[in-house]
Amino acid sequence: MKAIARQYVNLLICLIILVVIPKANAQIPSDGRTLCTQQLQKAIDKISKKGGGRLVLSKGTYLTGGLLLHSGVELYLEEGAVLLGSTNPYDYQPISVAHSDDKRNDNASMALIMADGAENICITGNGTIDGQGLQLALNIDSLHHTGERIDPNYNQRRQRPSETARPKLFFLHGCKNVLVEGVNLRSSANWGLSLHLCENVKLRNLDIENRAYWNNDGIDLTDCKHVLVADCKINSADDGVCLKSYHVDSECYDIEVARCYIRSSASAVKFGTASWGGFRKIHIHDIKVQDTFRSAIAIESVDGAQIDSILVERIAARNTGNPIFMRLGQRAGQRKGSLRNVTIRDFSCEVPFERPDINYDLRGPEVDYFHNIHPSPICGIPGNCIENILLENVNINYPGRASKGMAYIPLWRMGDVPEQIDKYPEFTMFGELPSWGLYLRHIRNITLKNVRLTLKDYDFRPAIVEEDVEGLIRK
């Protein structure tokens, strides 16, 4: 992370010499009722044209649609300042971005705060950015059903507008030298902080509560490089911190996620599901996970991504549905990925018998089959194995209470567990499993060092089941 530190010394020096623009209140309505998108955008444009500077929002509520940041601009929210997202869908327009080889167009390129190709941009202060995401999403839904604004990708099964139709809180594309620090971030209609193909990024001391609607991720880093996420509090209805790779010619590289508290109705820290390019040199450490429905850590390559050099350490997860999920699949045709050289150490997790996100308004969708408590799966596929895994100083407590009447896969039938080679990756994807602690399949070289698996109550299954595993070392 030394390179990142040098970049931010340069960034701070740059900001110090910039001209500071007077507080916005003198010219921009702050009553929370008057839409001031044009005034805010003109102020941002003016600062950028003058070579950069700071736009200060003092105490008050600024109602706005989508804003586009330009190079050299710092948006500073003083304590008591609220940047309030409009609930009118027509106040948001997508930015045109070059998707290169990403042809799926499966998420929105519009947001409350946007930037495209900008450098040296900052969003700082102690104020709040609130997307009013629930009402905005409901308005988008209503316009679809009245026929006024049809969403061609509308999710009929779950009765909600698609991710392409709902604005994010942030969408920063192709930006360099980005600092987001200190602000309170609330209620997107979609993902929270979405950074795509960005470099030299610092997200620090953020309080993120994004649980107003579906797909409410906390932070999404897509093919980003040299990123620090530190000292953040994240409460999200979907994944807390999610690393994605949409581009076969790019990757997430040199990323550190440190000292964060995460609650989630999905997974706390996740690699994927989009996994086309790669994930390398990733360090996840000192994370507290609480009341999380899916996995504390999920590492997935299912679209051909190369995953290498991953260190996860000092993770404490409580009331979490699944401790560890690693999956090497192949859903993108003939593209074969890899998952190797992963260390998870100093890791503890308590798995409850009941679902851990019961107090969420939006809860993760449960599977549609009867099952006992799932173990942690680490699974490759035939002919393409996960390689070089170390689990060290791992303590996991499971609830037990498995019943042969609920579901029963004895050891002599473990070959009946489906491979699910081209399926969506999730720790529940294999159905009932014949172990209660770890399920290991298609792996070459895995070391279990001081791994302690315990039960609160009796479970008829063995703690660990392995199939097509070579080089298993237990210490």
Image (cartoon, rainbow, N blue to C red):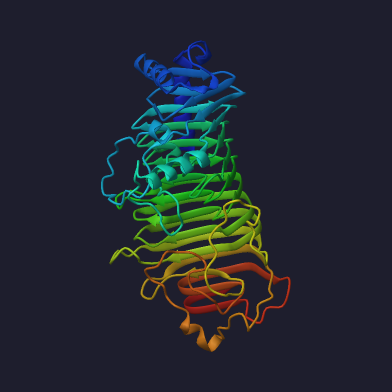
Of the 4 image quadrants, the one containing the C terminus is: bottom right
Q: Nearer the viewer, residue 237 or 271?
A: 237
Q: How many marks?
A: 0
Which residue reaches farthest right?
456
Which residue reaches farthest front?
146
Tell me: residue 389, above or below residue 126: below
Q: Nearer the viewer, residue 293 or 136?
A: 136
Q: Which residue is drawn at 47% across and 83% down?
A: 416
Would you say 222 lies left or right of 22 here? left
Would you say 275 lies left or right of 189 here? left
Where does residue 32 sit, x and y in percent of width and height?
54, 23
Where does residue 83 sit, x and y in percent of width and height?
52, 27
**Where on the picture, by quarter, is residue 399?**
bottom right
Q: Nearer the viewer, residue 142 or 18?
A: 142
Tell me: residue 254, above or below residue 84: below
**Where on the picture, by quarter, is residue 309?**
bottom left
Where does residue 350 sit, x and y in percent of width and height?
67, 62
From this viewpoint, is residue 420 visible? yes
Would you say 355 lies left or right of 447 here? right
Tell me: residue 282, above or below residue 28: below
Where does residue 245 sit, x and y in percent of width and height?
38, 51
From this viewpoint, is residue 77 visible? no
